[in-house]
Image (cartoon, coloured by chain):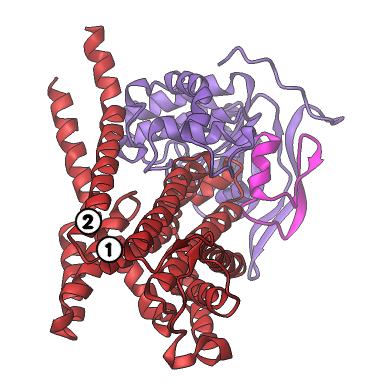
Amino acid sequence: MQQHAPRPSGPTGDGDNIIETRGLTKEFLGFVAVRDVNLKVKRHTIHALIGPNGAGKTTVFNLLTKFLRPTSGSIHFNGVDVTRTAPADMAGQGMVRSFQISSVFSHLTVLENVRVALQRPLGISFHFWKPRRTLHPLHERADELIEWVGLTPYRDVNAGELSYGRKRALEFATTLALEPEMLLLDEPMAGLGHEDIHRISSLIKRVAANRTVLMVEHNLSVVADLSDTITVLTRGSVLAEGDYAAVSTNPSVREAYIGGVHA
Amino acid sequence: MSFVVSERKAAPNLGSTSLRVLAVVAAGVLLAAAPFFVYPIFLMKALCFALFACAFNLLLGYGGLLSFGHAAYFGAAAYVCGYAAKTLGLTPELSILAGTAASALLGVGFGWLAIRRQGIYFSMITLALAQMVFFFCVQAPFTGGEDGMQAIPRGYLFGIIDLNNTLAMYVFVVAVFLIGFGIIWRTVDSPFGEVLRAIRDNEPRAISLGYKANRYKLLAFVLSAALAGLAGSTKALVFQLASLTDVHWAMSGEVVLMTLIGGMGTIFGPVVGAVIVVAMQNYLAHLGSWVMMIQGATFIACVLLFRAGIVGTIIHYLRARRGGSSGQA
């Protein structure tokens, strides 16, 4: 997996940033949830978005993944303006998101979960007259991915029966099946126990070896451990940005968290 | 050692496949022997409703979409098929195709509107559209209004085989059922079926994987409507009648009942459910309106005792038993 050839960098002069927002703003009935956010995510880094509750992290996240439309401002992915692109088209462009509640297809087996992601490029997903074995050539790749996240013993188990941590792992396998350039993770550690946090965070590190990861996360020790860059949001605006050492010693960040940051 | 491992791995697939093959063989024997023991008209009615329920289950069980207006496709096809056979004098197979095509077209329009909303709103839109079809059928000149369209000729299949012969008609209905059932089975097992089930389980996730969910839902809707139409057309020829009962909302409710009793999201569940409901209607008919009470009680009992339906519960039971034994091995 890690040996994949590096992806061609996008057709952009500013090739270092895979995603860039300009003046991103989102209003809900007069309430400004996100105000003038200019975010730059460097290629092949892990970038974390943190902030107190209601800071607009999830809104920014949903804007980036196109699940929400911005009121104003623009989003550029690989130098291309994707502000008006449909969410389903983002996967084809190389950007795949995860969800806060671990999101698998519960009545499909582990193998089917991965296979459904693998089959899209085949272009046969409307072929209701073709037998299931049409999909069998995908099994080799699917099994590789399943092994990579350590789920081989659960290959034929319904995803709904997996533990929470294993569902997360399966989600990664499914996401990686699309060979995304960029992963957006919405609170990847939410609801996980200590052991699972360790497992998933090493998974994220391995995933990020040749990809870009942007995540929203509450668990600050995870953020400290994983991220190259941290953006702190409060009340919809960017408060501070930098690596963990810089951000955690920033006085206004400490104030926003009311002493919540323990370095 | 390696033998044990490989055996355990193969067991689940082998089990469900051999179970299905067994079910198909049993069903085949049953279908062949049945007309010599049971009233053939009852069998044909059961087969038509079984196909109707299977078509409905394709949408509910595999697409997660609860249509509350499937009578529209069943009934409209019955009228169109009747009109084709009686007024236009088409052969039975062409009449059935006409009815099916009409329902498919109706499904394209209604489906396109309904899939824009989710959950209860989706159901309400399908219900409202079906009511429009009902009132159209009450008013339209060619449907015969309250009397329905009567004395639809069964005609000669391919212009040769006389379908007024009950056994010939029975074989024909069995063939139609098997074709429809085969299409549904294949659809569920196809690459499309896998994506459809993924969308049913988690639509936002499917979208994030790059699937435009609405297109898949629409295709499922149209297939379901067309196959419901196939069932309705065939029913019109069996009873030589298309009536307002076929497009009434109670018919939409009945197909929900059949699917839930048998087990939604299972291949054979709707067939079992349809046979049970049709049998109750036929053999308890002398009890008058008590049939409705018994049907209601059966439904409540099914929902309370086996939430996965009869076939769904059997599958769960078999799986649990197999899981337990392989765990010990």
Asked whether residue B75 is drawn in magenta, I would say no
Examine the rendering and report whether any part of residue A172 can be seen: no
Q: How many marks?
A: 2
Using a 10 Å C-alpha cutoff, classify the residue at mark 1 as few (fewer than 14 neighbours), some (14 to 19) or many (20 or more): many
| Residue B203 shows up from this direction | yes
Q: Which residue is mark 2?
A: B34
Q: Which mark identifies residue B43?
A: 1
Please name the color used to draw chain A. purple
Q: Is residue B174 above or below residue A259?
A: below
Q: Height in image: B152 above or below B196?
A: below
Left or right side of A201 for A247: right
User: Which chain appears red?
Assistant: B
Q: Would you place residue A188 above or below residue A100 in this image? A: above
Question: Quadrant of the image for the C terminus of chain B?
Answer: top left
The reply to the same-chain question for discs 1 and 2 is yes
Q: Are marks 1 and 2 in contact (CB under 8 Å)?
A: yes
Q: How far is disc 1 from disc 2 in space, using C-alphas?
A: 8 Å
Q: Position of residue B245 (x, y in %)?
A: 39, 82
Give percent across and percent down for residue A97: 57, 40
Instruction: State which region is magenta.
Output: A65-94
Left or right of B67? Residue A19 is: right
Residue A103: x %, y % from top left: 44, 42
Dot 2 crowding, Cα within 10 Å, few <14, some 14–19, many 20+: few
Q: Quadrant of the N terminus of chain B?
A: top left
